[in-house]
Image: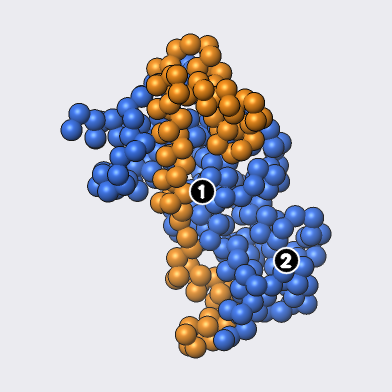
Amino acid sequence: MPAARRMKGELSEADLLDALRRGDRQAFAAAIDRCGDTIYHVAYRLLGSREEAEDILQETFLQAFQHLKDFRGEARLCTWLYRIAYNLALMRLRRKEPETISIDQPILLENDEEVPRELFDWCCLPEEELLRAELRSVLDEAIRSLPTSLRIVFLLRDVEGLSTEEVAQILGISTDAVKTRLHRARMQLRERLSQYFAGELAGR
Amino acid sequence: MPRSKRCEEWLGQISLYLDGELAEHLCRELERHLVECPDCHVVFNTTRRTIELYRRYGRVSMPGEARERLFRTLNLDDLLRDESGSG
């Protein structure tokens, strides 16, 4: 078995970091395979294109590997990489859409946007029914409709499965803010999906 | 739409409940409310299902070609060949 693969997911965090600092090239490959998917996903969901997601993926690892000495090991290696990727993606987003609000600003709620309106009960329909309804594009569309500050929290917490604390570190916000934004994101997505499924599946 | 003040308050807690962060006695109260209130029950179930669907279908992974190009950019392409060559 090649060394790069042997390293994947098996090295402890400390060993991987030591190897990276020694300039061990197999450790670089292992870091890519450990953290690359989430970096790509974050960049893709923030920027909306595969080309730009790949740019961010490359920039993140180039920057990180050049500045390994700055990483003091206070967070997980992946957490540090996600933070770099997130900041790079956010900078690019602000260049593209200067009106994008700061992730740090409090979110103002308008017109009770979190009060559930659509109460069509689609929770227990068989998955084939939901899948037939072009589920993936519906999911993509709904998550794209979220404000950036909610979208990023939802995808890191619920889709990528990171802890509240880790997401707070990546975004540089408090754990309470992570929880609040996660709840708002879930409510807005639920509403979107419910409206869609009510239109597609109700009354059949 | 669930209208009562109580419903609003309970719906504000369902994320904490789903994440296992709601105090035990409040969990029991919320569960009682969900049994009694069909609207909140729908919101609760569809929220949980929303999260499940995204967990299962919402992830986008780094494509193989993007990974290859990244390895080349970082001059790691020999490791790429090494890996693909030996199955």
Tell me residue A176's x, y (percent). 68, 33
What amino acid type should be assigned to the residue bearing mark 1? Val
Residue at the image point whose x is 46% and y is 30% from the top: B44
Could you tell which of marks 2 and 1 lies nearer the N-terminus? 2
Residue B22's quadrant in the figure? top right
Residue at the image point whose x is 31% and y is 47% from the top: A127
Instruction: Say if A185 sits above or below A78 in the image.
Output: above
Which residue position is annotated with label 1? A159
Element type at mark 1: helix
Q: Residue furthest left?
A: A204
Element type at mark 2: helix
Chain under label 2? A
Tell me residue A161's x, y (percent). 57, 50
Chain for colour blue = A
Which residue position is annotated with label 2? A13
Instruction: Say if A73 sits above or below B40 in the image.
Output: below
Q: Is residue A200 left or right of residue A104?
A: left
Chain under label 1? A
Tell me residue A106's x, y (percent). 64, 27
Instruction: Say if A3 sits above or below A53 in the image.
Output: below
Q: CA distance from mark 2 to mark 1?
A: 23 Å
Total marks shown come to 2
Chain B as rendered: colour: orange
Tell me residue A155's x, y (percent). 53, 46
- Point out the image quarter for the N terminus of chain B: top left
Crowd tier of the residue under label 1, counting other residues whose Cα lies within 10 Å: few below 14, some 14–19, many 20 or above: many
What amino acid type should be assigned to the residue bearing mark 2? Glu
Crowd tier of the residue under label 2, counting other residues whose Cα lies within 10 Å: few below 14, some 14–19, many 20 or above: some
The reply to whether discs 2 and 1 touch (Cβ–Cβ < 8 Å) is: no
Residue at the image point whose x is 64% and y is 26% from the top: B25
